Image (spheres, rainbow, N blue to C red):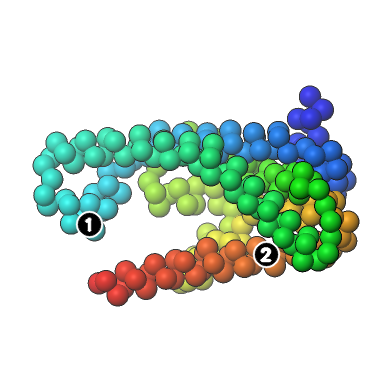
Amino acid sequence: MISLAQPARVLLDPLDATRVAVEAHRWVWPLLLLVLCVSASGMAFSLRWNASASVVQQLQMTGQLDRMTESELSEEIQSAPRKALIMGLLKGVLVMPLQTLLLAALLWVCAWLFDRSAPFGRLLSAAALAMLPIALYHLVFTICAFAQPSLSEARVQDLVPSSLAVLEGLSPKVERALRGVDFFNLWSVLLLGLGFSAATGMSRTRAVVLGCVLYMMFIGVVFVGLPGIAAAKMGGAA
């Protein structure tokens, strides 16, 4: 019970609890909680997803809709939630642990660049603890999703309004950028900086600033760069 309660206290007392958890190499329970919550949110989405509009739109874009019979279209719509369930479970069981491991490897590189030695177990603990707010988001999403009679893909993005993208009158580019200004993500960045400080001995201020810089780079690539490239390719194809 101590192993489970100690990482959980990180959400309530990040300054002291993060240091204790990192020094004790508490990464197993945070990682398991992340896997369970992300898998549950994927399951909730697949069970509440109304796939008709999305499937028809995708088939229209690929030009397959005109060649399909009504029974084939119905089968495609029925199989879409099952595929979404599999993808959601894979994200929880496989993608999120790999993402946490990659984050720990990135912290190791940062520690090497700043000439700070730290056992990899501590860095892995810092990465896993930093993912606790993400696990909490998926838990909240799961509860909200099961409370809905049905969900569309557009509704999913704003089901848990935790980012500045919920503001009205935004251009698409600004909206994509503001999706990165998310309460749970910023909470995760704070814990990442505190965990890195506890693992390497770097001052908390410098470690948190480092975490913010890494996150801004992440926003630039994921929320601005890649969607912009995709939009440009679609515009060129049109």
The percent coordinates of residue 126 (x first, y second) are 75, 48
**The N terminus lies in quadrant:** top right
Label 1 packing within 10 angstroms: few (<14), some (14-19), many (20+): few
Q: Name the residue under label 1.
A: 62
Residue 140 in view here: no
The percent coordinates of residue 93 (x first, y second) are 54, 36
Q: Name the residue under label 2.
A: 214
5 left or right, relative to 39 = right
The percent coordinates of residue 187 (x first, y second) are 70, 53
Callout 2 amino acid? Leu
For the point 49% across and 52% down, the residue is 158
The percent coordinates of residue 89 (x first, y second) are 48, 36
37 left or right, relative to 87 = right
Camera-side residue: 188 or 20? 20
Q: Is mark 1 on a helix, strand or loop?
A: helix
Callout 1 amino acid? Thr
Q: How many labels does the image show?
A: 2
For the point 58% across and 45% down, the residue is 98
Q: Is mark 2 on a helix, strand or loop?
A: helix
Say whether disc 2 or disc 1 marks the residue closer to the N-terminus: 1
Q: Distance between the residues labelled 2 and 1?
A: 37 Å
For the point 30% across and 49% down, the residue is 54
For the point 31% across and 39% down, the residue is 80
Camera-side residue: 26 or 2? 26
